[in-house]
Image (cartoon, rainbow, N blue to C red):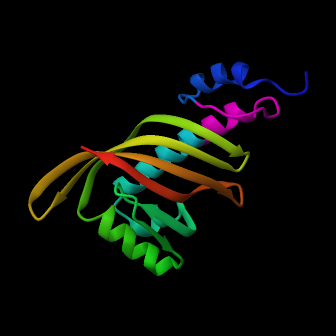
Amino acid sequence: MKYLTITTLFALFLVAGCSMSSGTFPPGTVATIGAEVNQFFADLSEALRSNDVERVLGFYTLPFEYVDYEGTAITIATQETLRTFILETTMTGTILEDEFRNLKVVNILSEDNVVVTVDEHWVQEYGGSTYSGTDHLRVTLVKVAGSWKIRKTELLGFE
């Protein structure tokens, strides 16, 4: 059989550390996407912990859309605006810890466009105090020149 059904691929995806739902793709595609997405979030976590905004910028593509938990959306079209957005929202203090957990692929729209949910646990130091929390996110990733990039982030909730 040239194409595997999603049921068969679901088991492969769990091995990669993700769960998903989608259509039918060529053999190995879903497992490959799962491994790539897992690595993407591990690399993003490392970049955030480096506290280097220039390094973090490489994980995004333009235009980038952000939707807050109330449903208010903003679209960012320039690199400078994206840099400012990241500094004012994600990197407000010194990042001590940043880890993505509970990664689930919600939908594979194509081999270069996926939607995931993930929990981002973070700890930052700001003004002599330490703050921590967990953001529940839905993230749309697109493949640009062979690398996954964040196209859209939706804040579903936080604690």
Is residue 153 found left or right of 87 in the rendered image? right
- In this view, 88 is above or below 29: below
Q: Which quadrant, please, contains the C terminus?
A: top left
Tell me which segment is drawn in magenta.
Answer: 20-36
Q: In the image, what residue occupies the spot 43% across and 55% down?
A: 47
Give residue 8's quadrant in the image: top right
Is residue 30 a member of the stretch shown in magenta? yes
Q: In the image, what residue occupies the spot 49% across and 74% down?
A: 76
- In this view, 19 is above or below 41: above
Is residue 12 found left or right of 57 in the rendered image? right
Q: In the image, what residue occupies the spot 54% across and 57% down?
A: 150
Give residue 146's quadrant in the image: bottom right
Is residue 79 found left or right of 108 in the rendered image? left
Image coordinates of residue 9 in percent, x first then y, are: 70, 24
Image coordinates of residue 84 in percent, x first then y, are: 37, 76
Image coordinates of residue 51 in percent, x first then y, are: 34, 61
- In this view, 95 is above or below 13: below
Which is more toward the observer, 128 or 154? 154
Which is more toward the observer, 53 or 64? 64
Q: In the image, what residue occupies the spot 58% across and 28% down?
A: 16
Which is more toward the observer, 116 or 95? 116
Image coordinates of residue 27 in percent, x first then y, are: 81, 29
Q: Which quadrant, please, contains the N terminus?
A: top right
